[in-house]
Image (tube, rainbow, N blue to C red):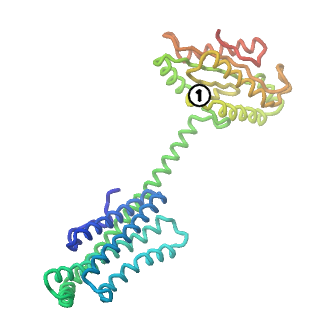
Amino acid sequence: MDSFEVFPWNDNFAIGIDEIDHQHMRLVDLLNELTATLIQDNDAELTRIFDELASYTHYHFSTEEMLWKEYFQEDDAWLQNHQDVHASFLPKVVQLKEESGDAPLADVIENIVRFLIRWLAFHIIDNDKRMATVLKYVQAGETLSDAKLKTEKEMTGATGLLIETILKMYDGLSSRTLDLLRERLDRIRAEEKLKEAYRQLEKLSITDQLTGLYNRRHFDNTFSQEFRRAAREKKAVTFLMFDVDHFKKLNDRYGHIGGDVALTKIGTLLINLCRRPGDFAFRLGGEEFGILTTEQSPQAAYAFAETIRTSIEALDIPNVDSDVADHMTISVGLITRIPEQDDNPDTFVSRADAYLYQAKEQGRNRVMASD
C-alpha cells in the first residue's frame, strides 16, 4: 500500500531530451513521495517533501527555459506561452494553500497533489512535447516556422484526443489512489487508538488505582522474572516490605478518606524515590507495600530503606492515636543477597515479612534486616 504510485511514470511521457526526461521523472518521484507521506500523518515530513518539490520544480523550469531559448527568440509567442505556464505554477499552488484556510495540512497537500498530477501530466505531454517536437524538426533542418506548423499538425486531432484521454485516466487514477491512501490513514489511526486503548487497559491491569503503584498481580510476575535474572547473573536482589504503623487507628480517627489520602501520598513518594530502571514499587494490599530492586550492596539497600522510612515520616501525616508517634510512621523488613540454590521469591518474601514482624516487635518505626 505504501508503494502505490499516484502518478505512474510511462515511457510515453518521454519527450526525447534526456536531461528533461530525467528531471520529469524526478518530479514524478517527488510527487509520489509526497502523496505516500500523506498517510504518515507527519506534518514536518509533508512540509519537507513539499518544499523539496517546489525547489526542484523551480530548478527544472530554469533548465527547460535555457534550452528553449537556444532555438526560440525572446519574443517568440511559443516561448512566452511556455514561460507563462511556468510562471503561473507556483502562484496557483499558493492560491490553493491560501484558499484552504485552517484545514489540516494533509488535506491541503491532498488538494495540491490533485492539481499537481493534472498540471504535470498536461505540462509534459502537451507543452513540453510541443517544444521538443519543434526542436526535433529544427535539428532535422526545418525552419522554425515550418517546424511549428508540422508540430501543430502532429499535436492536433488524434493526439489531442489522446492527451485528454490520458488526463482523464490520471484524474481517475489519482482519485482512487488518494481514496485508498485516505482509507489506509483512517485505518492506521484507528489501529493506533486501539493500541493505545490496549496499552491503557494493560496499564490498568497492573496498576493499583489508588496509589498509582504496581499491584499485587504485577508483583508476582515481576518478582519471578527479576529473581531468575539475578540468580542467573549472580547479582543481589533487594526486597523490602513495609506497612503503616497502626493504620487502623488512622482510619478510625480520620475516616477512610483520610486513610486513602495517606496511602496516595505514600504512592507518590515511592514513585519519586524509585527512579532507577530496576526499581519496582508495589502496593501489596491494604497498608502493605513492597519494593524490589537489584544490584545494591546490603549497606546501600539499608540506606535506601532508611530513606524511605524517614521520607514517609517527614510527610507529617497526622496519626494522633498511634502508639508510636502523633504522625504516620512505617515499619520495614529488608532482605538483600545474591539468590542461592534453595532460594526463591517466596523465601525472600517470607524472610522480609519475618524482619517486618521483628521491627514491629521492637517498637515499630524502624528497619530490620539480615546481618
Q: Which residue is rendered at x = 77% and y = 19% of the image? A: 365
Residue sitting farthest toward the left: 140
Q: Between residue 240 and residue 61, name the one nearer to us.
A: 61
Q: Is residue 122 above or below residue 22?
A: below
Q: Which residue is rendered at x = 15% and y = 86% of the image? A: 142
Q: Is residue 366 above or below residue 18?
A: above
Q: Between residue 102 and residue 75, name the one nearer to us.
A: 75
Picture coordinates of residue 242, whole percent (x, y) = 69, 22
- In the image, is 361 to the left or to the right of 174? right
Picture coordinates of residue 42, whole percent (x, y) = 47, 57
Which quarter of the picture shows residue 161?
Answer: bottom left
Picture coordinates of residue 83, whole percent (x, y) = 35, 81
Q: Is residue 192 above or below residue 81?
A: above
Picture coordinates of residue 276, whole percent (x, y) = 59, 30
Three-letter residue code for mark 1: Asp
Check disc 1 and report the residue beneath it.
Answer: 279
Q: Between residue 139 and residue 240, name the one nearer to us.
A: 139
Which quarter of the picture shows residue 165?
Answer: bottom left
Tell me, yes or no, if residue 171 can be seen here.
Answer: no
Q: Quadrant of the N terminus?
A: bottom left
- In the image, is 137 to the left or to the right of 88? left
- In the image, is 55 to the left or to the right of 219? left
The residue tagged with tag 1: helix, strand or loop?
loop
Q: Which residue is rendered at x = 28% and y = 73% of the image? A: 169
Question: How many numbered markers are drawn?
Answer: 1
Q: Quadrant of the C terminus?
A: top right
